[in-house]
Image (tube, helix red, strand yellow):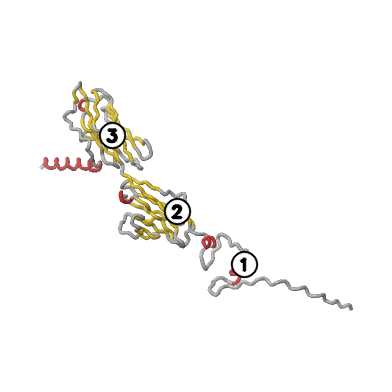
Amino acid sequence: MTLFQAGPRPEAGPEPPHYWPDESSTLGHGQKALVDAPGYVPPEDFVDPDGLTSESNHASPTFDESTKRAVTTQLGQTAYLHCMVNNLGDKTVSWIRRTDFHVLTVGMETYTSDERFEALHTPKTNDWTLSIKYTQLKDSGPYECQVSSDPKISFFVNLTIVEARATIEGAPDIYVKSGSNINLTCVISQSPVPPAFVFWYHDDRMINYDSARGQMIAVQKALEGTALSKLSIRGVQPSDSGNYTCCPSNAEATSITLHVLNGEKPAAMQHDANPGHSLSCSLYSHCIIPILSIFIILILR
């Protein structure tokens, strides 16, 4: 029987590296070895029980630079200042009023006694919004959206509160001949939101939109932030003379005096022009009726 002599044993190659878990780690041996192995790239949805996802462990918070940095809101309306934060992770978003460096909100908590301020956030979105209700002129100025990263990062938004103004073209006085057609144009400027309504008054009487006397009212948007209301009167008569008031829902009223000329003499000489006349539309429309009601009650007594 022939015996085979074993050849030389092949040299053993280098042993594969061994990766042992830290004492503080909650991962198993195999998991820890896999995570720490050179060149290993975990999947996007990998969750490390000792921390956050692999993506959030490495990405720092950033702002969406397409967010508006300038916001214009009409006096009395609600202002919304948006702050889009990517990769927020476990960091916190705060809103600071830069005019006095007052911290308004931290996360969803409010740190001011002014109840007009509120933080808004929808879960699973990157939008952290500062809401300011019933805006006042003093609310204008810069606001800071700050993220509690290391180092901290900030996004600034400038808020401008504007007060709508109404003027009638040709004020304070217009002179026309009897029988003419006239157009009174009321311009409502600095009005980011168009007025909900525009009332016209002849002296103390509201002009109906469907007047059979040839009076027509049209409201239209002219330019961004500007609206027009036109009162058209066909074949004016001396009785049409007097004070005309344009009363938008979002601005102080403004007036003009119409003089209808019957021959050479103005038919409205008895009406005093009042170029400085201005009143609040809300007061104008809500005060006349109560006063008349009180007057009627006194008569009935």
- The residue under label 2 is 84
Pick the quarter of the image with the N terminus: bottom right
Residue at the spot of label 1: 37
In the displayed orientation, state which residue is furthest to the right: 1
Q: Earlier in the sequence, mark 1 or mark 2?
A: 1
Label 3: how many Cα within 10 Å (few below 14, some 14–19, many 20+): many
Q: Secondary structure at mark 1?
A: loop
The image quadrant of residue 101 is: bottom left
Instruction: Identify whether 172 is placed above or below 97.
Output: above
Q: Amino acid at mark 1?
A: Ala
* Circle 3 residue: 168
The amino acid at mark 3 is: Ile
Instruction: Count residues near mark 1 (Cα–Cα under 10 Å), then give few for <14, some for 14-19, many for 20+.
Output: few
Marks 1 and 2, Cα distance to the nearest angstrom? Answer: 36 Å
Q: Position of residue 53 (x, y in %)?
A: 53, 62
- Secondary structure beneath dot 2 equals strand
Q: Residues within 10 Å of mark 2 (few under 14, many from 20)?
A: some
Label 2 is placed on what type of residue?
A: Met
Give the CA separation, mark 3 to mark 1. Answer: 78 Å
